[in-house]
Image (cartoon, rainbow, N blue to C red):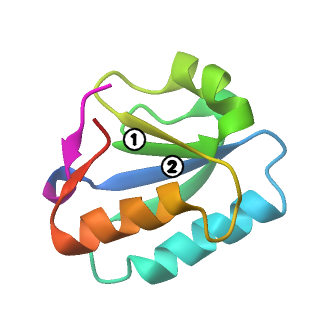
Amino acid sequence: MAGIESAAIKKIVIACDAGMGSSVMLASTLRKQLKGQGIEVIHSPVDQIPADADVVVTHQGLAARARKTTPQGAVLIPFQVFIGDPAVTKLVNAIKNGGVVGG
């Protein structure tokens, strides 16, 4: 998996199976954490990830399905827990500090 420079990220997709609950809260939390960064954070079914996604964040249990619909060139970030997961924290820090996401 190739990485992406944080400055190139315009859309982050939180991909889930059911669409209610924890993943919606994660999307809301990321929107707040990345406010002012010029990045759109949306929620999407794992089987319908938009073609313009730069980063796809999904639970590790859905990562195999997400890989099938993640656009070429986008970074897939699997996580284990919805709130406070180190993978999500690393994503936020890379964006805020101008680093590379994924890779």
Q: Which mark is residue 13?
A: 2
Q: How busy is the neighbourhood of tag 2: few (under 14 within 10 Å), some, or many (20 plus)?
A: many
Tell me which residue sits at (27%, 75%) in the image. Answer: 37
Q: What stretch is highlighted in magenta?
A: 1-7
Residue nearest the observer in this picture, 84 or 48: 84
Q: Which amino acid does label 2 sit on?
A: Val
Is 88 in front, or is 29?
Answer: 88
Question: Label 2, label 1: how many angstroms apart (C-alpha)?
Answer: 6 Å
Answer whether residue 6 is magenta in the image: yes
Q: At x 51% / y 49%, what residue is drawn?
A: 13
Asked whether the residues under the numbered discs 2 and 1 touch, taking CB atoms below 8 Å apart as contact, a structural biologist would say: yes
Image quadrant where residue 29 sits: bottom right
Residue 70: percent from left, percent from top: 47, 27
The secondary structure type at the circle numbered 2 is: strand
Residue 100: percent from the left, percent from the top? 20, 51
Residue at image position (34%, 33%) is: 74
Relative placement, left or right, of 7 versus 28 is left
Residue 89 on the magenta span? no
Query: What is the quadrant of the N terminus in the image?
Result: top left
Residue found 21% across the figure and 42% down from its top: 4
Q: Which of the 4 quarters of the picture holds residue 3?
A: top left
How crowded pointer 1 is (Cα within 10 Å; few <14, some 14-19, many 20+) is rated as: many
- Which quadrant is the C terminus positioned in? top left
Identify the element where label 1 is drawn. loop
Residue 67 drawn at (x, y percent) = 53, 22
Judging by the rendered image, the residue that carries numbered circle 1 is 53
Q: Picture coordinates of residue 80 (x, y %)?
A: 68, 49
